[in-house]
Each structure stands twice: as C-alpha cells, then as structure tokens.
Amino acid sequence: MKYSIKAGATDKINSDCIAVVVWNKGGLSEEAQLADKVSNKGISKILRSEDFTGTLGQTHIVYNPVGLKSKRLLLIGGGESKKLDSKSAANMFRAGLKAVYASNAASAHFAIASVTVKDETAPWVCKRLAQEAEIASYRYNQTKSKKSKAVTANLISVSPSKGARRKSLEEALKSGSIIGAGINRARHLGNLPGNVCTPSYLADEAIALAKKHSSLQVKILGEKQMARLKMGSLLSVSAGSAEEAKLIVMEYKGAKADSKPHVLVGKGVTFDTGGISLKGGAGMDEMKFDMCGAASVIGAMAAVVQLKLPINIVGLIGAVENMPSSTATKPGDIVTSMAGKTIEVLNTDAEGRLVLCDVLTYAERYKPRSVIDIATLTGAAVATFGSHVSALLSNDDKLSESLIDCGKNSLDRVWPLPLWEEYQPLLNSNFADIANIGGPRAGTITAACFLSRFAEKFKWAHLDIAGSAWNSGAQKGATGRPVALLVEYLSQQKA
C-alpha cells in the first residue's frame, strides 16, 4: 500500500473513491458540504431518505457522483463531532476502509482536513489512518488452496489539515503504515498452525528479518547451547517434544554500542497441549496462539528497524513446543533454572513461566534499562479483563505508568494488578525453592510473582495478553497486540 498527502478541493480530487465525513443527525463536514453543493444536494437527499444518518461507523457509497471527479463518493458516519475522540476516530477509519476494500476501488482519498479529533493532532490522524489501512488489508492465505481476494486498493491519500506541515503528515503516514505492518506480521505468525509455525520457523523468521536490515543482528541458540547455560527450566518444557527448543536473540543497534538497551521478552510456546497436565480437548486448537507473545516481539522489532529508532533494543524469544510423551516433564518433577533456583513443577500446563524465567535471567547480561515480557500466560487474566485490556504487573511504578499512558495513546490498553509481597508465599514448596503455581486464587498475580523472582536486577514489567492476543468464534484469529503498545513505548525512549 502506498500513502500520500494530496491537497485540493473535494470536487477536484481525481480518485476511484473519495471519502467525506457526515456527522450524526445530518451534520456535514466542510468537505461533505462542498460535495453536497456540487452534487445538487445529493448528500442531503440521502440524509432525508434516512438510509444514512451519520451514526459512528455507518457507511454509504454513491457511484458516479454528480459534480465530482472521483468515481465513488463514500459517506462515513462520524457520530457526534464534539465527541470524536481517538477511539471513535479509529472506529470511523476502520469502517471507512472496510467499505473501500469491499469495493473494487484501486485508490481512495480521505477528504478529512476539517475533521478534528479530541486531544489529538493532525499527524496523529494520518498515522492512525495508515495503521488502520494496513490492518484492514490483512488476509490470511498461507495454508488455503483457494486464496482470499487481496484488496484492490493500493493507494490511500489524505487531505492536509490547515496549518499542518506536509512533511510531518507524510512521516506520520509512513510511521502508521510501518506499525500496521508490524501488527499484521504478528497476526500472521499467530494464525499459522502449530505444524507450520514451530520454534525453528520462528527462528527462521527472525533470521530473514535480519537479512533485510543491517541494524539488526540475530543469533539462535539450540538446546545444547541452552543446556550449557543451565537453562533447565526452559528445557523442561520442550523435553516431551520432537521439536527442538530455540532461544532467539535479536539485537537492534540504533544508538552507540555502549548505550544500554531496552529488552523485550516473548513467550513462544508454538503449541501448548498442557504436557502431562493435559488440557481439555475443547478449544485446544487455539493453543497455536500460545506463541503470540513471541509474535508481538518479532512484529515490534520489524517496526523498530524500519522506524530507525535512536536506541538499542534486544528482542529475546523462548520458543518451545509443550507435548506429552515418555520424556516429558511430570507433575512433581523438580528442575533447576539458569538463575540456580530450583522449581517444583506442580502443573506442566503452567509452562510459560518456566520458559520466561530463564529468558529473563539471560536478559541480565545486557544490563538493560528496562525489560518487558509479553506472554499469553494465564486464564485468570481472561477472567479478569476479558479481551479489552492486557494485564500489567511491574516492579517499577514509573515503568508501569509509562506503559499505561502508552496504552492509551496507542489504543492498545493495559491495566495494572498488584505485585504485593503478600502473594509470594502462595508459591512456597516443601521440596524446592519455588513452586510453579500458586493455587486456584489470584492466578495472574502469582504467575507474575513467580517471574518477579527472576527480574530482581532490572526494571521489569509483565504483560499478560491471554485475553487480548486473539479472538475466538466467527472472528477467530490473532490480533497482533500489543505491537502498537510496544512500539509506542520504545518510540518514547532515549539513548
């Protein structure tokens, strides 16, 4: 998809489709007013018919509109103009783009120069539109014999807002498209089946990305190398699988070599049967999504290298498959982590934390400015927040506050849970330093408490995306969250 800023009056723009905003109860944006005037009150007639009312997200296409050079006129409902905030604007763009892509329009122009979004700037509008355009264009085809039709549109243009610098708007379009592409990359990896997207497949994805960008260096550690590092906890998860575990290390250099990096850690369980603590059969197919934390790290790193952020960033992924077999770890087994702490594995389906704890210990070698781990970790997070927000737990208040703000800015929200000392005793074990589960209560919190034991040497935040990483039902598929949040956070950091 190509994006551009195109100036000109609504009736002079030559495009396959020109989009204007109509407010609730028939209020017209400036661009819609002009289109209405040159079309002999064509929009007003539609409004009087009540086929279109301007409700937020409503759309209506007029073909061969009178008085316009464009082949189609798309009316997009904006709701109440005074209530158009960032979330409403994103919904409005999403609806408009869906209508464009459902047509055969090869190009579309959004005549929205007069449209203002509460508490947001003109560059934000361009950035969000481009991001939504990329996301809406995604089609999954890799494992289908009959491919879904790709969107016809290949050019999206936007009218410049009055007083806005053209260069800043163009940069915003580029940034939004890059973030949207990063989200789609994460979605695609999540959507792949477990027999395709194995730990080795994820490793190859990282290697392929590095080959395209000289600022990114990738190394892959196999099981023998991890054994030498004494990553007994991570390797206990892959013990029952024929698929070799991989530690994927992605190092982006955007600043001086001695500048301490920010680290992203992704859980990459490419399929989770639960191991010996076998999951129920219903819905187990969705356990291919248990690597969405890893997918978000790859998606974010892909965006970072294209945005050329002026900081150093490390992406670490523990990629494993959790299977039951004669060699699988059993409930009651005790394993030793890279940090030297012994762990009683009471439930082999609480495997994500066993992977992450060793990767967090590995992260210590970078002396990081901050570490964020991303994981589809607990059903308790789904029960608490549903799919709307990701759970956030952290050992640093400033880091937590920053992520909450970045979540609001990116519309990829997180919300905090307490990481209090009172919860730590729930992980006590009679036979090891720590148990890998804390019982039936406060499951998201005790999972984070477990991880906190391995994150004592740096500022750390844990994002439990079990509820937000994918959708079930008719719209089943990965969401690409929290790529937008991660990129927003990293974009605000300085070397």
Image (tube, rainbow, N blue to C red):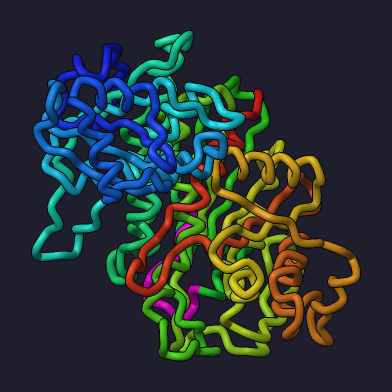
Q: Is residue 143 above or below residue 395?
A: below
Give 106 or 201, whichever is nearer the viewer. Answer: 106
| Magenta: main secondary structure | loop
Give 426 or 182, whichever is nearer the viewer. Answer: 182
Q: Is residue 240 magenta?
A: yes
Residue 281 lies, in percent from the top left, at 41, 90
Which residue: 58% across, 51% down? 265
Residue 479 lies, in percent from the top left, at 42, 56
Q: Is residue 449 magenta?
A: no
Residue 229 lies, in percent from the top left, at 61, 58
Q: Quadrant of the C terminus?
A: top right
Q: Is residue 171 above or below residue 313?
A: above
Which residue: 52% across, 25% down? 309
The residue segment tinted magenta is 238-248
The quarter holding residue 330 reads: bottom right
- The answer to whether one can see residue 182 in this image is no
